[in-house]
Every structure is written in C-alpha cells, then in structure tokens.
Amino acid sequence: METTTTTLPRWDLTAVYPGLESPELEAGFQQLDAHLGALEQQAEALEPGTVDDALVALFESFTDDANAMADALFTNFAYISCQVDVDTRNETAQAWASELRQLTARAGKIRTRYDAWLGALDVEQLIARSTVAAEHAYLLRQAKVAATHLMSQPEEDLAAELLISGGIAWSNLSQDVSSQITVRTGYIPGQPDEQPMSEVRNLAMSPGREVRRAAYEAELEAWKLWATPMAAALNGVKGQHVTLASHRHWNEVLDEALFQNHIDRQTLDAMMGAARDAFPDLRRYLRAKAKALGLPVLAFYDLFAPISASERVWPWSDAVAFVTEQFGTFSPRMRAHAERAFREHWVDAEPRPGKVGGAYCTRLIGDQSRVLANYVAAYDGVSTLAHELGHAYHDLCESTATQLQRDDTPMTLAETASTFCEMILRRAALKDASEDEQLSILEAELQDATQTTIDITSRFLFESAVFARRAQRELSADEFCALMLDAQRQTYGDGLDQELLHPYMWAAKSHYYWVDAPFYNFPYMFGLLFSLGLFARYEADPEAFRAHYDELLASTGKADAAELAAWFGIDIHARAFWESSLDVIRADIDRFVALVEKRELSF
C-alpha cells in the first residue's frame, strides 16, 4: 500500500522548547521541580476542618496553584512523549522521560493528598461558598468518591514511587520493544529486506492477498520472537492493576475503569448487550466482503483489504484538502482549526523506524495539539487523520477549562469529537459518489464499525479473562495467545476463518499496556455509538445542534456522561438508544450487501 513517505510531514514541537539539548528545556524542568516543591509543602499542611472563610481561601489558593502546576506538567509530558514516540531510540529523549516520571510521581502524591482532603470536607457547602469550587463541582464530587478508595497516605506515596519502576517501566518496555522490532519482508514481492513493525502492519491494507498473507505471517513470526518480554510487560501492568484495585477496595478492576470513564455498569451492560445483538449483522458484512474479494471466507489478514484493486489512492495533499473542506461544512471554526494544524505543522504522518505505531492526538500547549499518524494513502488513512484532528478540535473547545477539569475528561467522552469528525467526512465522501466508490467508502465505515463493536468486545473479553487469571498468577505468552483466540472466536464467529485469526493481538495493541487506563477498549465503542446518536440529531436540526455541540465538548470534564447526553435528549442507560445507533450501522450493511450483490450480477 502506497504511503507517499517522501512527502509526508513531521511535526514541529518548538512551540514548547527549541530542542532536547536546549537550555530552555533545562530551565523548564527546574521551574517545574520548584513548583512541585512549593505545592508539596502546601499539600502536607492540608487538614480537614469546617468550611469557613479561611478554608475557602485555602481551597481556592491551593486549587489555582494545582491547576498551574498540572498545566506545566502536562505540557512537559506531552513534549517529551512526542519526542520519544517518533524515535524511541533517542537516548536523550528517553533520559528526559525518565526524569519526568519522577516529577509525575510527585504530582501523583499531591493529587492523592488533595482528594483525601476533599473527601474529609463538606464539599457541597464548599461549592455553595466558593466560585472556584462551583466551577470544579464535578471534580470535587468525584474526589469525594475517589477518597473512599484511597489507601493510607504512606501507602499511596509508596505506590506512586513504585509506579515508576513497576507499571510504567513495563509499559515503556512494551513500547520500546514493539516500536524497534524489524520484520524480515524481503521475500514479499516489492518489499525491502526489513521493515519496522508499523509498516508491516500497514501491509494489511495491500490490494494483493499474497502480500497481506505474507505480511501477516511475518508479523506473527516477529511477535513470536519477542513474545517473552511482551508477556512479561503485560503481566507487570495487569498485575499492578489487580493489586492496587484490591487494596483500594474496588470490587474489581472494571469498577475502577467505569468510575474513570464517568459511566456506570447499567450503561455498559446496555451498550455491550446491544452490540452483541448486532454481531450477526456485522458478520453478514464480513461475509459480503469475502464475496466482494472472491473468497469463501475472510482471514484475519483480509479484514483491512481494499475491496477493489482500483480503489482511490489518497496522496497527502488530497487528504489535507478534503479534511479541511469537509470540516468547513460543520463550522468555520472547525475548518480554521484544521487549517492551522496543517499550516503550523502539528501532524507527524511519516512511518519510520523507531516511531511508535498507530495514531493519536495530544494537547501540547495552550490551544495547540499534536497528531501522530502512520499515514497510508487510502481512505482509511484520511479517516484516521480526521479522527485525530477531531481530538484536536475537542482540545480547542476545552482550552478555556482548567487543567484539572481537562485531566478529568474520560476516554468515553474523549472519543466523541473524533468519531463525529469521521462521520462528517464519510457522509461527504458518499455524496455523489459512484456505486464503486460508495462500496469502498461504506466498506471503510463498516470496517471501522466492526473494529469498534466486534473487535472491541473481543478485547474486553480478553482483558476480563486476563484480570481474572492474573489475580492468581502470571500468564505465559502461549496462555495470552489462547485467551486472545478464544475471545476472537466468540466475537467474530463465522465472519472469519477460525484457523486464521491473530493470536498476538495482545502484543500488537498498545492499549493493553496503559498503566492509568485499564479496559482501554469499551470507551471506543461508547465513542462510536454515542457519536452516531449525536450525528443523527445534527442531521435532524443542524443549527440547533451547532449551538450546543462546542459547549458539550468544553464540558466533558465537568459532568458525567449521562448528564451531558441528556442535553441532547439521550438516555445512555436505555438499551434503545444504543440499538438506534446500531440501526444506522445495520442500514449501511444492507446498502453494502446490496451493492456487492449488484456488482456480482454485473460480472
């Protein structure tokens, strides 16, 4: 699959510091260290008491300082992370990242003291008496709950310190290993002798099935060689989650994840149940895709295959033009933000050795974000670009919020703007498209829908099984593979060849190794289906929707998901809402199947 590597941009991070060797970076870390030191002294002195004028003044002063510290910490973290992620072999960047982890651990101790203090106060009275507290009302109420799940302060301090040599170390190991793996591909037609794992995984989108098959086999062989350190890393991360959840008196790790994501079990069950009911329809799409490719059944390596050898190639310049134009159909503000992102070099799109795979967006400084991608010149690459720039637009809308509020935005709601922007592009691409083009665009949409329903469910089942077993002992790489295959068989069913699945997807997906985000899977499903519901309301009344949409994005760290959904008349506790969103996908499956059958009849 063409990537047009020579023309792809790299991002510019000089809005923060001139470079990793600059005196400005050294000074920035020194200032952050001093800021943390001052705040640590204040945190040590926090004592519960009656909510009087003195305590209100203390709360407001401490919260303002905490916001300033959190903002500086986040910017430094984003800058160093961006440097590491485009070159994990850069020892200077890795050294700064190690130093930053020490500072982050100190900030974690301050936050637990802050939450414990708030947990001992009458926060409702504080909210009534303080403007700053009222602005942070949701955060205070969440802190009240979080305080009930804190260990003693010495234990929390020790956990924060051990995190650096525990879960974070294991997470970094997984990232360093996976980003630096080179895969032998010289025997694949048209490919160099060796390629980084990210580029080999991109070959899953090649129009040639032999190329896809060979890349898949080469990928599995490479993961097998590196399975031991990857399994050790996964055991380390998941073991830490299990241990801390138990000591913090969560019934299970999932309960903690739901709290972090601002939803409850009723919402999760309603959504996941509706998704399971849609599996037969999604498998119907997979069988139709197999027919379109002239296959009896899809293999795992066919999931991302283009259904036409003549599928449109999207050079980078075409992607940029299309994204900015379609963002403009929603609002001038959204278009201007995308234009700024390209003009100011916010995007790093070039796959290269040492760069991590996948794609993400991070806020960098102020209202600026940065987007990491490994661009492939296909519609899927364009859609991914729109998705990540949707995150950047969300960051813009939240730029007036405090850092503590922004830190409280859950992953469930963080996926809202990104998925919404994908749909803006998809609707535009389908308009006036030929039947063959419609088929390709619908296929890209349904491919994504399958990933965020069937595959996300498989990841959820896998992670649930891992947590259950990890509470007893460590698991071997072979056991991880067996659990992954079982989860894929439960979900993909007869939509895929049961003998050609992907046993090492637990190593390929970096989300499993995130220390601060157990169950980094169901939020993607929430984001897709919630955004489908929002998009339906947008199409029904665009002007009324626009009037509240940016406010919704600006408020994602200020209320729970149910409250924000209610602004648009959505009840996320009701299975009917999730079913209505899945009905949109079912309608597109019907359209896709009809186009496939029509094309078959024309041959």
Image (cartoon, rainbow, N blue to C red):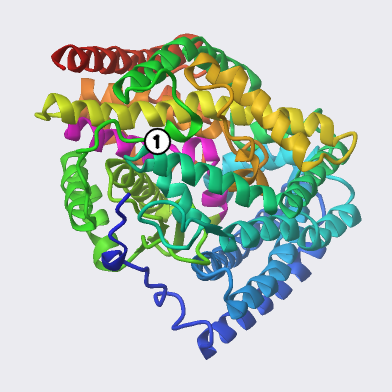
Question: Which element is circle 1 on?
Answer: loop
Q: Position of residue 287 (x, y in %)?
A: 40, 16
Kind of residue at disc 1: Phe
Vertical side of 33 occupied by 5: above or below:
above
Q: Position of residue 293 (x, y in %)?
A: 32, 26
Vertical side of 220 occupied by 523: above or below:
above
Most frequent secondary structure within the magenta stretch: helix
Residue at the (52%, 46%) spot, across then down: 135
User: What residue does disc 1 label?
Assistant: 304
Vertical side of 448 occupied by 517: above or below:
below
Residue placed furthest toward the bottom: 23
Q: Is residue 23 visible?
A: yes
Q: Is residue 419 magenta?
A: yes
Residue at the (37%, 17%) spot, across then down: 285
Q: Position of residue 265 (x, y in %)?
A: 65, 21
Q: Which residues are magenta?
A: 404-430
